[in-house]
Image: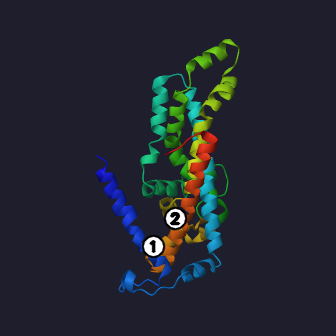
Amino acid sequence: MILPAVTLLTVFRYVPMYGTIAAFQRYKPWLGYRGSPWVGLDNYIRIFSRSDIWEIIRNTFVISMGKIAIGEAASLVFALLLNEVSVVWFKRVIQTLSYLLYFLSWVLFGGILVNILGFRGLLNSALGAFGLKPVLWLADPNLFQPVIVLTHTWKEYGWGAVVIIAALAGIDPTLYEVAAVDGANRWQRVLHITLPGVAPMVVMLLCLSLGNVLNAGFEQLLVMQNSAVLSTGDILETYVYREGLQLQQYSLATAVGLFRSIVGLVMVSLSWWLAGKLANYRIL
């Protein structure tokens, strides 16, 4: 039963690892991996000597951490609010509608956002109706990162709340009944029963999210990025795409990809340790 999954993992994850040797070569496609000249760490020296690489790393870190922090907070708040709804059919409808956006591709959802946030989009039209000036939501470098984080949260918060809702379902309902008998109001029950009940799950999700600290969302940025916002919107993944596929600098792109993988491995190991330390969660 696991053979198809193992096959896919081997073919698309482990076999391509052989190509990482291009990070230490001046790779030429017509020479192949064995014929391309070996340059050692020269590609990394070239990468980290560039004036814009630290800006790209900072953009990647800020966007990814913003998505993790705000996304988890939004999912938690939504799950807590939904847990307070007593009408079952209404609760199910809202939950279903909330994570429908998750199944849209960023190509489609990005087109919707451009129509909403564009210079002549729906949002600026609404601002104009109140006599306000239009805002360059997608062309202002100072606004681009918050827009990326918030639109990602809008798309993903419903799906992220599913795990928290499952944790809420595991809280013993008699605790709420006893608290109500003792005179606790709804806010006090949330504060002293609900939040402690889901805290281990939230901590675990935050810890495990550290493995994606350099994954700022390639598809979203590729769709919504433009030349006006490269100073705050260029990330490592779009840099690899531009250098590797557009400029055909295969060795540089591979070197950056390997750097991301190494950092990801370190962060996944750290998240595994933190999840066990703070949430008593272990994957053996």
Q: Image point 52% across, 28% down: which residue?
A: 169
- Whether tag 1 and tag 2 are in contact, CB under 8 A, the answer is yes
Marks 1/2: CA–CA distance: 10 Å
Amino acid type assigned to the residue bearing label 1 in the image: Thr
Judging by the rendered image, the residue that carries numbered circle 2 is 261
Say above or below: 262 vs 126.
Answer: below
The residue lying furthest to the front in this view is 284
Q: Residue at x 59, y 70 (%)?
A: 230
Q: Position of residue 172 (x, y in %)?
A: 56, 22
Can see residue 2?
yes
Q: How many marks?
A: 2
Q: Is residue 171 left or right of residue 88?
A: right
102 and 190: which is toward the camera: 190
Q: Amino acid at mark 2?
A: Ser
Which residue is labeled 1 in the image?
A: 20
Place of residue 284 in the rendered image (x, y in percent of width and height, measured from the top left) = 49, 46
The answer to whether residue 225 of the structure is visible from this angle is no
State the SS at label 2.
Answer: helix
Residue 200 at what x, y percent from top left? 60, 37
Relative to 269, does residue 56 appear above or below in the rendering?
Answer: below
